[in-house]
Image: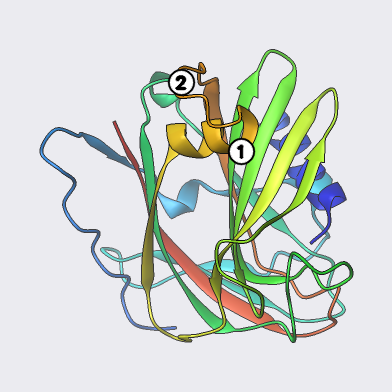
Amino acid sequence: MNTLIARGLLAGLALLQAAAPAPSAPPPPPFLSEEKLAVSGFRVVERDSGPVNYYQLAGPSDGRYLHADYRPPLETVTLGLEIPDPLRQRARKLRWSWRALQLPNGGNDCVPGRGDSAAAVYVVWKSGLKYYAVKFAWAGAGRRGRICQQSRNLFTAQDAVIQESGGPLGRWVTEEVDLQQVFRSHFRGGDPRAEIPDLVGLGILTDGDQTRSESAADYTGFTLLY
């Protein structure tokens, strides 16, 4: 996925102001509270999406998840979720679970022309008129932890991180990221005293348009810890 799509997600968030049940999230440390974000709250970011929504809710009522099933030549669709106002400054960590079901052929956000992901989670902050976004991708190929697609301009700053690469397929994986550490390391040179702007939104994307290949994944368990 290229930076134009990511920019569309940022603009869309400004306007928004598998059959097995999903796994239950592990309990947070005792000093943290948590707020679960219902996957049913994700909405199509229209400025960044084609006409066919290939995401659907699945699973039992106590284990709902979003299933994404991209098939070429569909236009890509991005879903976005606005963070509730009381949590925008309080959130310290983000946890989610995902599972890749089908990898785009050679999809790798760090290779021009092959920037497709079985699954991707965007974390978006806003300071004044400027948006900051980090994309955590489950790629078909590439080195885990590699940072790429770095883009900076007057109104947006965005990076992509290969969070997972390749298999295992069909198995839930739970991720947890320190939101303050992520922001400071990507956008403030690691300064531990840098102020953190409001966390305003999350986004998800499964795509295969650049590699012209099928791609599928499930998402659930979005939780903010504070």
Above or below: residue 10 compared with residue 69: above
Marks 1 and 2, how far apart in space?
24 Å
Spot occupied by residue 16 in the image (x, y as percentages of width and height): 65, 32
Numbered tag placed on residue 9 in the rendering: none
Numbered tag placed on residue 186 in the rendering: 1
Q: The disc labelled 1 sits on which kind of residue? A: His
When asked about the image quadrant of residue 56, the answer is: bottom right
When asked about the image quadrant of residue 78, the answer is: bottom right
Could you tell me which residue is drawn at 87 percent across and 67 percent down? 112
Spot occupied by residue 186 in the image (x, y as percentages of width and height): 61, 38
First in residue order: circle 1 vs circle 2: 2
When asked about the image quadrant of residue 172, the answer is: bottom left
| Quadrant into which the C terminus falls | top left
Above or below: residue 69 compared with residue 161: below
User: Callout 2: 10 Å neighbours few (<14), some, many (20+)?
Assistant: few
Q: Which residue is mark 2?
A: 85
Q: Secondary structure at mark 2?
A: helix
